[in-house]
Amino acid sequence: MAQAIEVGLCGKGNPGYRQVNLAGVILAAGSSTRMGRPKALLEFKGETFLHRLIGHFTSVCSEVIVVGRPDLQFPALGNAKLIVNPEPDRGMLSSLQCGLSTVSLQSEAVIFAPVDYAPVRRQTVLEIAESFNGVLTLPVFEGRRGHPCIVSRQLMQELLALSVDESAKTVIHTHLHEARLVPVTDSRTVEDVDDPEAYQQLLASVAHDQN
């Protein structure tokens, strides 16, 4: 796995440059009710959603954590670490909190996304990681904020402090004035593959996209 990601737009030897140890958290504990089968195991370009996102995150992270559910088995995950949310029906925040609580102390920030967003391009993930501003960084496609996003350790603690009936958006919105919004050309940062129709549309798009 990558040991650190270079952040800042100024390059080595300049004031804006430094390295940040990122952890990656993939949320794969949803029930996939609308899809009718586990979204983590959907195939796209010769690999599962889960393995594709693990690969993307591995290229920029020193550790990758997958949050699953008790009734779902995953194939071998390589160097990624699997943890199980014992009560996934409490909602996505509970899975995010499970993942964040497992992040090592060496990681200074976390990039995270639901497994639904696995179709994003690897280059997009790299652009987001390299643009991290030390607080909060999100991709923006045609005015819409998407995934994956990166939060600092301070924001990690705020997310962990939320009650289970709250949303991660509470913390994101509180710090939005501090965020770096990264313009991207990747529409998949805002496309939630949540049902069979969306999945078929994704597959139909493959012929027009080589990334």
Image: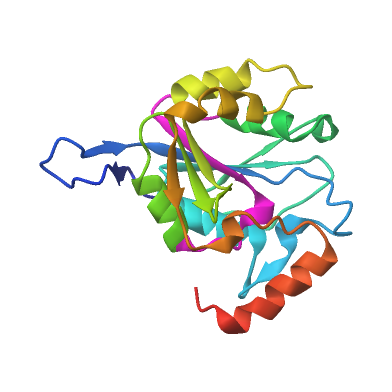
Image side of residue 152 versus residue 168, left or right:
left
Q: In the rendered image of this protein, does residue 197 appear above or below residue 70?
A: below
Tell me if 58 is positioned left or right of 76 in this view.
left
**Which residue is painted at 70% across and 55% down in the image?**
192
- One can see residue 101 in this view: no
Question: Is 4 displayed left or right of 121 in the figure?
Answer: left
Whole-percent x, y for residue 102 in the image: 57, 28
Q: Is residue 112 magenta?
A: yes
Rendering coords of residue 47 (x, y %): 62, 69
Q: Nearer the viewer, residue 139 or 52?
A: 139
Q: State the residue at coordinates (83%, 51%).
A: 32
Of 40 and 71, the residue lying toward us: 40
Furthest residue in direction front, as rendered? 143
Residue displayed at 52% across by 42% down = 149
- The picture places residue 165, in percent across and down from the top left corner, at 79, 22
Left or right: 18 in relation to 26? left
| Numbered range of the magenta stretch | 102-122
Indicate yes or no whether the magenta region holds residue 205: no
